[in-house]
Every structure is written in C-alpha cells, then in structure tokens.
Image: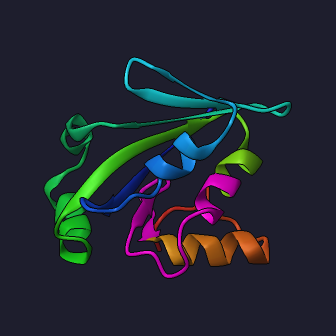
Amino acid sequence: MRTIIVFVPACSAWPKNFFTSLSNVREENGRWIVETDGGWAALYSDDQIWHDYDDDEKREVLEKLPNAEPYVLESNDSSLLGQVIMSAPSRSDGLIDNDHGFIAPIWEIQRRILLGEAWLEISPK
C-alpha cells in the first residue's frame, strides 16, 4: 500500500470533488473509497496528520501553502494514485508529500508522472 499526503488550500474543491464525482465511489467513516479492476484508492481529511511532521517540515509546508488542509491518499495501485494526482487542476497550488520526505508542488509531481520519472520513492536531495 502507498500513502501520500496531499496539502491543498482550505478552499480547494480538489481532491474531494474528484472522488465524489466517480460513479464507483463509496463513503465509509469519512473516507471516500474507489475500487477498480486494478486496485483501490482512499481519501480522507485528517488534521491529526500534522502531528507526524517535525517543525521544519511543518514550516516548509506552511511557507509554501499557509492555509494548507491535509488529506491522506492511500492506494494499493500506484497507477491509480497517479490518475488521482493527474486529475488535479493544472498549476494547482497544492503540495504532495510522498511519505519519504519529498514535498513538492502538485504540478511538479504531475510533470514527473507525465515524463515517467520517479516520485513515489525519492527522498529530498
């Protein structure tokens, strides 16, 4: 299973609207879950995620996105994870933390996906 954290502006409709627009989505205990033939993905909002960040990481996120709202995005299918990320509006103000310390703008992750570059397992330079 892969877990990433998606930070979006508090007023952002994505990624929640993407999930809720899918015909095969269901909600369980505040989590939106979509299943496909290849796997599943789940999304939920969790302010408690901030407890997993040290002061430097919090500062990095909040300097780039002062009103950041964290979502946990989990999937057992990295292709499906990429599809969810690619559904974000172009040049979105959001950030993605790949759970290996690499925090980048959503558009940078989208660029990496389009070019077939690594993004899930890389660590900061």
Q: Nearer the viewer, residue 27 or 113?
A: 27
Q: How are the colours assigned in the image? A: rainbow
Q: Is residue 92 visible?
A: yes
Occupied quadrant, residue 60: bottom left
- Choose top left, top right, bottom left or bottom right for residue 14: bottom left
Q: Tell whether position 84 is magenta.
A: yes
- Residue at position x 76%, y 50% in the image: 79
| Residue at far right of view | 37
44 within the magenta span? no
Between 48 and 29, the one lying in front of the other is: 29
Q: Position of residue 55 (x, y in %)?
A: 14, 57
Residue 3 or 69: which is nearer the viewer?
A: 69
Q: Is residue 99 visible?
A: no
Q: Position of residue 69 (x, y in %)?
A: 26, 54
Q: Is residue 21 left or right of residue 13?
A: right
The quarter of the image holding the N terminus is: top right
- Residue at x 59% of width, y 59% of height: 85
Give the residue at x 19% y 39%: 51
Say how many tags the image has: 0
Give left or right: position of 89 versus 39: left
Q: Bounds of the magenta span?
A: 83-104
Residue 108 locus on image (x, y percent): 55, 77
> Above or below — where is 27 with respect to 88?
above
Seen at 39% across and 68% down, the residue is 94
Vertical order, 61 against 47 (above or below): below
Residue 15 in the figure: left or right of residue 9:
right
Q: Extreme bottom residue here?
A: 91
Residue 22: give x, y in percent of width and height: 64, 42
